[in-house]
Each structure stands twice: as structure tokens, then as C-alpha cells.
Amino acid sequence: MRPPDELVVVAGVMPGPEPGSVLAFRRAPGRHHAGAWEFPGGKVDAHETHASALARELREELGIEVRVGERLWEGRAPGPPAVRVSFFEVAVTSGSPALTVHDAVRSVSKGSAPDLGWAPVDAAFFHWYASKMP
């Protein structure tokens, strides 16, 4: 059970076009963490599983349908409210990402993204993830 003042957030990690790469998205102006790079996703509603929330958020934000895979990593950001973010592998099953809450997308790999200007929890995740990349 989560603390009542904690937000639960999910994020999707999509493979990029090059072997070993993933897609990062930049938050558009006027948004929370504007200009920061992230893995897209959003809040989990009380009635949702992590997988259903992530599929819904990616449909709403990017106009894509996905298959949610395994949870890769979980991190926390201090509050208030405290935020717990779980990062999941996702595979796009339908559509191409349309930028609505983001203004750019790019493929990143181990050596191409450490100084990208990540949102805080996404930076911690990518540091961990890059250590696992070949």
C-alpha cells in the first residue's frame, strides 16, 4: 500500500532505431519540467494497474498503442508530494508517436545522452539503464 501523499507514476522505455538505443522525449514549453528529457508516461489512477495506466498515458500523450513489458527500475522523487516512478519496457504495437506534450524526440544510447538535460528521476533511471547497455 502506498502512502496517501505519494503519487505513483509510470514511464515507458521504447526501443530506438539503432541497436541498443531507446527513445527520449523533451517536455514542451509550459509543461512541468519544460525542456527536460524524459521517458513518457503519467500518473496511475486508483483503479488502474501500472500496465493499464501506462498504455492509457501513451495513447493520450503520443497516440500510440503499446504492449507493456517488464518493470526495469523504480525511483523516487522527494515531495511534497513524493513521487514514485516505475519504468517499464514497452513495444509499440500500433501508430507512430505524435508530439503533443513533448516538442522533440530523439534516439539515445549509452554514450549519447548522459548530459542531455534529463528530468530528475529520468536522469537517475538513464544512469542505471546505461550501465546495463552493451
Image: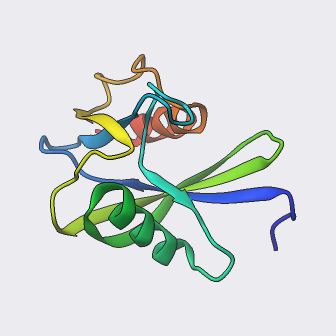
Q: Percent x, y for residue 93?
A: 19, 71
Q: How far across and down, in percent of the image, does residue 52 sit?
A: 47, 77
Residue 60 placement: quadrant: bottom left
Camera-side residue: 16 or 26? 26
Q: Residue most toward the bottom?
A: 47
User: Quadrant of the rendered structure where residue 23 is?
Assistant: top left
Residue at image point 27% right, 45% down: 99
For residue 52, side relative to residue 1 (left or right): left
Question: Which residue is at the front of the view, 78 or 108?
Answer: 78
Residue 1 visible in the displayed image: yes
Figure check: 96 above or below 36: below
At a point 57% along the width and 79% down the height, the residue shown is 49
Give how far across and how far down residue 97 sits, in percent. 22, 53
Q: Report the colour scheme.
A: rainbow
Please count the marks in the image: 0
On screen, 89 above or below 53?
above
In the displayed orientation, state which residue is furthest to the right.
4
Place of residue 20 in the rendered image (x, y in percent of width and height, measured from the top left): 22, 43
Q: Furthest-top residue in view?
A: 115
> Which quadrant, please, contains the N terminus?
bottom right
Q: Residue at x 25, y 64 (%)?
A: 64
Q: Specify the quadrant of the image occupied by residue 91.
A: bottom left
The quadrant of the rendering that contains the C terminus is top left
Frontmost residue, 8 versus 89: 8
Residue 133 appears anywhere in the view: no
